[in-house]
């Protein structure tokens, strides 16, 4: 009887994961075994300018979130399923100044908004900056809201005087739903204003930003739940409330680590999309000033430690669209074939310094540039692609190596991203890192992690079956060879990059 009830619950019940990404708002309904039922997504428009701005219209984001959430709610209810809960995820580091009437005064600044770079550089080069980083676990960089607030107050003094509080996009949506300003531990910890040890706003960071705790949201755990009447989202004539528990969840990076099952510290995760990140679980807040590692909590004694890089898939995309082709034609077909062909085009003397988008970890220099070194007449397109892939992975290893120096060596490396569908890339990465590589089946880590946190918050347990598609083991002799090539890569960076960038490396 118990087994039948469990099967019925898996079939007839679901939890919805909701994620506000940098480019897409998405909602996915999951069964209790972690399988996907239905989903919807919508692109969110980002405006970028030459001054480094990257902004979104808060109301447009809210409308996109509402649209995808409504769509998935209607679909699962039409199928006769019960929505047990909703889990909430969002990208980190966004900032919206709002007035006393809770109306936005400024467009939402995203993590990649580079306008506060002067404030961030000055803060990092001060003792105050080092102290704030050590206590908050947020890298001091233009992406951090603590720097964004300082920039906004300098650039828009009149608007700053009218600002009643500073919030993230996620907080803005939460307030629209519930009428209260609340922020979860994970999103708060990515502001540079939150003390990762005391789980409260950090007074010296507030003093630097020249704001009070009253100008920030109330801090709540990632398991915090409020009930939402979803009737208005269904587009029906029903008048009776349909209440669903909504778990506030966390940030996309923290929740993706939860979804991958890597909170114990025995695994390290390498995720590659447009950008790249290295993450692992740890039992206490940890800072590493050499690479400005982040340290974001899920809960007390559960932290995600890692570092972000700008140099992910964007490097390969740039190379294909702007160097190897005239107009980026046939990308979906030709790009993966070119990556596959590059497996047989290794060149020991060809290197790519991959910083076409500047860089965060490990060098933290927005002005860093890309270079190809060692070009010869016989080099073909495949050689350039091979060198670019290696350059991206050398940079990832640089970050991971420094993390492992302080946190210890994990048992395995979990990889995620389309590039790792290439067998030779998995083998090359395993040899470089000298770790067993585990490639998991493609999943939306942010929404699945949000669903896992939400299920636990309401007292239920998802029965997740993580599907491992490939396991690749390293070869010691190849690791020794690639280690020597990596050292050459580091030396070339020291020559090519500005001296000021490499002084602290």
Image (cartoon, rainbow, N blue to C red):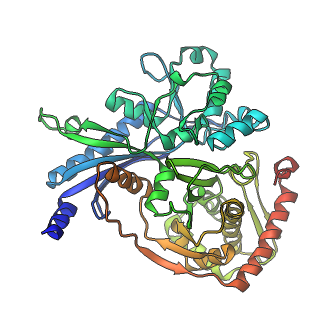
Q: Nearer the viewer, residue 150 or 453?
A: 453
Residue 297 position within the rendered picture, expressed as x and y whole percent measured from the top left: 52, 47
Eyeballing the image, is 310 above or below 467? above
Please give the name of the residue rendered at 50% of the width and 63% of the height, measured from the top-left corner. 262
Confirm whether residue 11 shows in the render: yes
Query: What is the x, y in percent for residue 40?
Result: 32, 51
Identify which residue, 193 or 44, lies in the foreground. Answer: 193
Q: Residue at x 33, y 48 (%)?
A: 457
- Determine whether 357 is above or below 488 in the image: above
Is residue 342 visible to the viewer in this orientation of the structure?
no
Is residue 370 left or right of 469 when viewed as pictured?
A: right
Q: Is residue 192 left or right of residue 251?
A: right
Q: Please tell me whether residue 428 is drawn above or below residue 120 in the rendered image.
A: below
Please provide percent x and percent y for residue 198: 56, 38
Q: Nearer the viewer, residue 483 or 65?
A: 483
Q: In which quadrant of the rendered view does residue 158 lie?
A: top right
The quadrant of the image that shows the N terminus is bottom left
Residue at image position (59%, 57%) is 277
Q: Residue at x 79, y 78 (%)?
A: 348
């Amino acid at each position: 009887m118990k087994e039948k009830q469990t099967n019925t619950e898996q079939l007839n019940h679901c939890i919805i994961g909701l994620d506000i990404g940098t480019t897409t708002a998405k909602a996915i309904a999951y069964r209790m075994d972690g399988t996907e039922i239905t989903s919807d997504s919508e692109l969110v428009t980002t405006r970028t300018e030459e001054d480094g701005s990257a902004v979104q219209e808060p109301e447009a984001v809210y409308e996109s979130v509402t649209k995808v959430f409504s769509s998935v709610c209607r679909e699962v209810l039409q199928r006769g399923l019960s929505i047990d809960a909703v889990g909430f995820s969002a990208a980190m580091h966004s900032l919206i100044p709002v007035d006393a009437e809770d109306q936005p005064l400024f467009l939402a600044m995203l993590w990649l908004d580079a306008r506060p770079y002067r404030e961030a550089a000055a803060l990092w080069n001060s003792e105050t900056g080092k102290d704030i980083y050590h206590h908050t676990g947020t890298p001091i960089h233009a992406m951090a809201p603590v720097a964004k607030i300082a920039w906004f107050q300098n650039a828009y003094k009149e608007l700053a005087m009218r600002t009643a509080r500073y919030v993230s996009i996620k907080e803005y949506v939460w307030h629209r739903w519930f009428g209260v300003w609340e922020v979860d531990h994970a999103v708060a910890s990515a502001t540079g204003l939150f003390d990762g040890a005391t789980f409260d706003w950090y007074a010296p960071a507030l003093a630097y930003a020249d704001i009070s705790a009253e100008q920030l949201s109330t801090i709540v755990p990632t398991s915090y739940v409020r009930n939402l009447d979803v009737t208005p989202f269904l587009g029906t004539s029903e008048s009776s409330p349909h209440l669903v528990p909504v778990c506030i969840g966390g940030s996309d990076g923290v929740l993706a680590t939860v979804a991958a099952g890597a909170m114990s510290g025995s695994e390290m995760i390498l995720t590659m999309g447009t950008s790249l990140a290295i993450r692992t679980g740890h039992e206490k807040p940890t800072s590493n000033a050499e690479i400005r590692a982040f340290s974001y909590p899920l809960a007390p004694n559960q932290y995600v430690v890692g570092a972000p890089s700008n140099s992910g898939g964007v490097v390969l995309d740039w190379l294909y669209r702007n160097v190897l082709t005239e107009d980026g034609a046939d990308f979906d077909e030709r790009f993966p074939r070119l990556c596959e062909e590059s497996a047989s085009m290794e060149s020991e003397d060809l290197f790519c310094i991959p910083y076409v988008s500047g860089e965060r970890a490990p060098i933290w220099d927005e002005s860093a540039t890309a270079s190809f070194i060692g070009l010869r007449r016989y080099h073909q397109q495949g050689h350039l692609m091979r060198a670019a892939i290696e350059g991206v992975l050398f940079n990832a290893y640089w970050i991971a190596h420094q993390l492992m120096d302080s946190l210890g060596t994990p048992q395995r490396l979990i990889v995620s991203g389309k590039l790792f569908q290439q067998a030779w890339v998995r083998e090359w990465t395993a040899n470089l890192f000298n770790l067993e590589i585990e490639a998991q089946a493609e999943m939306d880590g942010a929404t699945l992690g949000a669903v896992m946190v939400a299920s636990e918050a309401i007292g239920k347990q998802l029965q997740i079956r993580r599907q491992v598609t490939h396991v690749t083991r390293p070869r010691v002799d190849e690791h020794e060879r690639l280690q020597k090539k990596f050292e050459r890569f580091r030396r070339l960076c020291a020559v090519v990059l500005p001296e000021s960038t490499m002084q602290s490396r």
